[in-house]
Image (cartoon, rainbow, N blue to C red):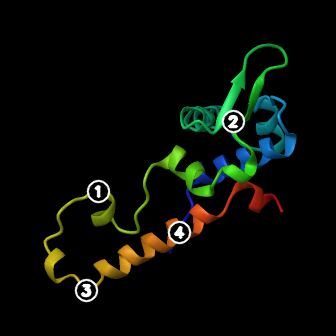
Amino acid sequence: MLTVSTKEDYALVLMSALAKTGKFPVSLRSIAKKQNLPFRYLCQIAQGLKKAGLLGSKEGVRGGYFLAKVPGRITLEEIILAVSGPWAPTKCLQSGEICPAQKNCPLKSVWRGMENDYFLSIAKKTLADILN
């Protein structure tokens, strides 16, 4: 079963919260408090999103984080990849390890298809879609 990690879930909650505030910077502390999320963990997640170009930040009294793009231009795939990196349904597809059963594996095409379906679905969904 596909499981969204806590990190991915919090990243989606953070991005949704920022999308609702518009272009104005919002402190992570206020989002953490309002959404009942751990502040320090949210800081780490925000750094990954900023590094990926999905968030901007402003320092100072009225500082905080804001979306670097409009919600309709940010896909769920971008958010998830920014905080977790590439996803694969099995260890052999994820790590690139050579599996001893690779030549005779009846499931590799199933796992590869599942991986493709997952990325196709999250690549089509935007942050704007989940706000509606």
According to the picture, the residue beneath numbered tag 2 turns out to be: 68
Alpha-carbon span between mark 4 and mark 1: 21 Å
* Residue drawn at (58%, 33%) of the image: 44
* Residue drawn at (74%, 49%) of the image: 71
Looking at the picture, how far across and down is residue 110, in whole percent?
Answer: 36, 81
Quarter that holds the C terminus: bottom right
Q: Is residue 57 visible?
A: yes
Question: Is 51 on the left-hand or right-hand side of 62?
Answer: left
Alpha-carbon span between mark 2 and mark 1: 31 Å
* Residue drawn at (70%, 41%) of the image: 69
User: Which is nearer the N-term, disc 4 or disc 2?
Assistant: 2
Instruction: Pick whichever, 73 or 129, lies toward us.
Output: 73
Dot 1 surroundings within 10 Å: few (below 14), some, or many (20 or more)?
Answer: few
Amino acid type at circle 1 is Ser
Residue 95, which numbered label?
A: 1
Alpha-carbon span between mark 3 and mark 1: 19 Å
Residue 36, which numbered label?
A: none
Amino acid type at circle 3 is Pro
Amino acid type at circle 2 is Ala
Looking at the picture, how far across and down is residue 131, in whole percent?
Answer: 81, 58
Amino acid type at circle 4 is Leu
Alpha-carbon span between mark 4 and mark 3: 23 Å
Question: Is 115 on the left-hand or right-hand side of 8?
Answer: left
According to the picture, the residue beneath numbered tag 3 turns out to be: 106
Looking at the picture, how far across and down is residue 80, in whole percent?
Answer: 56, 52
Q: Residue furthest bottom?
A: 106
Looking at the picture, how far across and down is residue 90, in whole percent?
Answer: 35, 68
User: Which is nearer the N-term, disc 2 or disc 3?
Assistant: 2
According to the picture, the residue beneath numbered tag 4 turns out to be: 120
Of marks 4 and 3, the one in the foreground: 4
Q: Secondary structure at mark 2?
A: loop
